Image: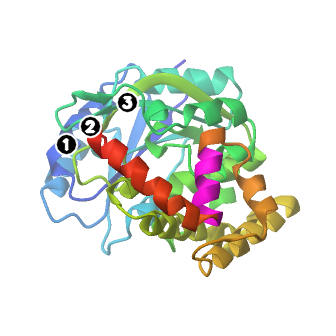
Amino acid sequence: MENEQIDVLLATYNGEKYLEEQIESILNQTYKNIRLIVSDDCSKDKTGEILKKYEDRDSRVKVFYQKENLGYIKNFEFLLNQVESNIYMLSDQDDYWLPEKIEKSYETLKKNNADLVFGDLEVVDENLQTIYTSFGDFMKLNRKIHKYINSYKANYLYNCVTGCTVISKKEWIPKMMPFPAKTKYFAHDHWIGIIIGTYGKMAYMPEKYIKYRQHGNNQIGTNKISHKFTKLEQVRNLFIEVKLGVFGTYVENNEKFPKQIQELNQKAYDYFKMLEKKKNFNFRCWNIFHELYKTETPIYYIENFIIMNMPLIGKGLFKIRHVILKLAKKR
């Protein structure tokens, strides 16, 4: 099983606090035939010293030191352009990989003849103590993943592919380059997932082989911004802003999609653009909303329908819901 070398791509930036623990967890995997490729994005702490130590110690480690800050999306793009092996994996700088992660990910890729495999995670605090046993359950992703894993729909409305769980094939890299990076609401793993989900085959591992560390400085994590809001208008404005970022990205890269999805991309973008001007009620383009949200649970569908199209009605309901959640200490 270890005849094939796997490139593990690690993007770093001011990661001194947890970096050594993560690198150790990667180098001590049961699957040994790996190359750890690191790109440091102009760190100002001791990250560079840590990386130099491992580069000198282990011939499997190759480090690139950027001269100008790229941002994490373009840093991962740089790393993907350094891939030489037929198989690669993505890694964050602050997690902890269980010893069998690479072995089990590779087995799943081969067994399913998949182009990309991603998986669930155990969410932990900075001391690796469990917060949520399943990221997929907490974020309410698992139902949709299991139902639409063989369709672009699994990753279309929002991202279900967590980058640090990904193992994929080098042959797909040219098809997804360059990464879109104009909005903070659209990350590299979303783009990887939508491209391969549209044209290739994805598989999912419900097993958790990563301790997904949440420590307050994560670029992406479990924090739900909308939970901090006390007014429906704040939630609605954020939802519209996010969706304009997502569908605006799709439209700007429409040549990457089949014609049918190109048309939906434009209609979805126009729908959310229209909603910016509708403050109380919207009676137009409900068919577009249905097309986008029909894959969701009934509760999620109804909640978002009210937020998007009937905000005047939703205001009172939102206040009641917020008070109940606050009393239950969930806000």
Q: Position of residue 60 (x, y in %)?
A: 35, 38
From the image, tell me which residue sits under label 1. 18
In the picture as drawn, the residue positioned furthest to the right comes out as 259
Upstream in sequence: badge 1 or badge 3: 1
Badge 2 vs badge 1, beta-carbon distance below 8 Å: yes
**Mark 1 to mark 3 CA distance (whole Å):** 14 Å
Q: How is the image coloured?
A: rainbow
* Residue in the picture at 69% in, 24% down: 112
**Mark 3 to mark 2 CA distance (whole Å):** 10 Å
Q: Position of residue 52 (x, y in %)?
A: 19, 51
Say whether residue 305 is magenta.
yes
* Residue in the picture at 64% in, 48% down: 302
Q: Position of residue 308 (x, y in %)?
A: 61, 64
From the image, tell me which residue sits under label 2. 22
Q: Is residue 235 left or right of residue 276?
A: left
Asked if 144 appears above or below 331 in the picture, the reply is: above
Single out the mark in the foreground, 3 or 2: 3
- Element under disc 3: strand
Q: Nearer the viewer, residue 234 or 292?
A: 234
Q: Quadrant of residue 26?
A: top left
**Residue type pointed to by label 2:** Gln
Residue span colored magenta: 300-309
Badge 3 vs badge 2, beta-carbon distance below 8 Å: no
* Residue in the picture at 59% in, 40% down: 168
**Residue type pointed to by label 3:** Ile
In the picture as drawn, the residue positioned furthest to the bottom comes out as 277
Q: Position of residue 141 (x, y in %)?
A: 55, 37
- Asked whether residue 313 is in view, the answer is yes
From the image, tell me which residue sits under label 3. 210
